[in-house]
Structure formats: C-alpha cells, structure tokens
Amino acid sequence: MFSRVLTNMEEKDFSYIVRVANTDIDGHKPVYIGLARIKGVGRTLANAICAKTGVEPTARLGNIGKEDVKKLNDVASNLSSNFPAWLLNRRRNYVTGKDEHVITADLQFSRQADIRQMQKTRSYKGIRHGKGLPVRGQRTKSNFRRNKGKGLGVVKKSQQPAAPAEKK
C-alpha cells in the first residue's frame, strides 16, 4: 500500500493509539479532541482537564509523554473532586446525594438505572420510556413511527370495475 514517511510532527516515539480512561484514542488528534472521544467527556471538560494537568490542549496526543498520559488518567479517574459542580454530569446523585461525574461504562449503567427508577416509581417519564414513546413532549402524530410499531400509511379503496353507462 502506501509507505508512511515520518513528518516533523511525528517522532520515532510517537504513539499511534493512546489509552486514557479505558478508551483507545487516535494519537494524531489534538489532546482536547481526543479526550472528548471518551464517553461522558465533552470539549469543555476536556479543556478543563488539560488546564488542570498542564498539558497543551492543541498538542498531538501521540507526541505527549507517558508522564502526561498518566496525569490525564489520574485526573480522568477522579473528576468529581477536581472540578466545580456545574461542570459535572451527575449532580445530586439519587442514591448518594453527592455531585459526581461518571464516564464510559459507568455512564451507561447509571443512565439505565435512572430509567429503571423512573419506571419503578411510575413517573410520567418512566411510563413513556416503558412504552417506547418520546419522553420530552415531542409530538407523535407524524414522527416516532419506528418506536411506535408498524407504519400506518393510507389504504386505497379497492378498485371496482366501472359500471357500464346506460344508453337512452
């Protein structure tokens, strides 16, 4: 295929894949874009992580050293204590009552647990989740057919042969 020539951006110790918070990230991406690839981390939080660790956000992720990757892992594993509450994605947790920030598989698990809790308490949102209908007040007359089941459509009347015209 194509032989890849090392550019000045890529050194011999360039890491093509960097593992941060149990997520494989492309080493060619800038640090803040790469961190945003972690489920539960957006660009704002990624920039805040870069500022907290002292890593240049626009540097290529494959070019930063192992010490910086370790710093990123440490901060990403303990986001709740490092950042203000308004930046976290799980404020006043239902079970613990604390402000937390969950990422990766924990985020999916907590979301499913929240939906199960709503269904258990028979809240409006829980009932809508159970029926597979839109939860946040969207209209259902013309949209959400894939969630509601088979499409309705219009049924044409069966074609009847035309009656012969009477002659006078």
Image (cartoon, helix red, strand yellow):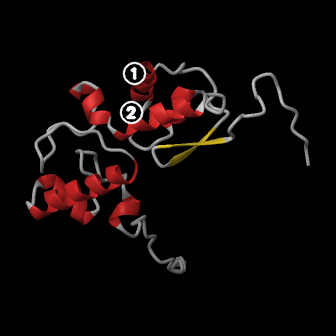
For mark 2, give the secondary structure.
helix
Amino acid type for the residue under numbered disc 1: Lys
Above or below 37: residue 146 = below
Q: Residue at x 84, y 31 (%)?
A: 6
Q: Residue 9 is drawn in which quadrant? A: top right
Question: Marks 2 and 1: in contact by CB < 8 Å?
Answer: yes
Q: Residue 30 is drawn in which quadrant? A: top right
Say left or right for 122 vs 5: left
Q: Residues within 10 Å of mark 1 (few under 14, many from 20)?
A: some
Say left or right for 68 vs 106: right
Amino acid type for the residue under numbered disc 2: Val
Q: Residue furthest front?
A: 67
The residue indicated by pointer 1 is 52
Q: Residue at x 22, y 58 (%)?
A: 113
Q: Position of residue 24 (x, y in %)?
A: 56, 47
Q: Position of residue 99 (x, y in %)?
A: 18, 36
- Name the one closer to the observer, 41 or 50: 50
For mark 1, give the secondary structure.
helix
The residue indicated by pointer 2 is 75
Q: Residues within 10 Å of mark 2 (few under 14, many from 20)?
A: some
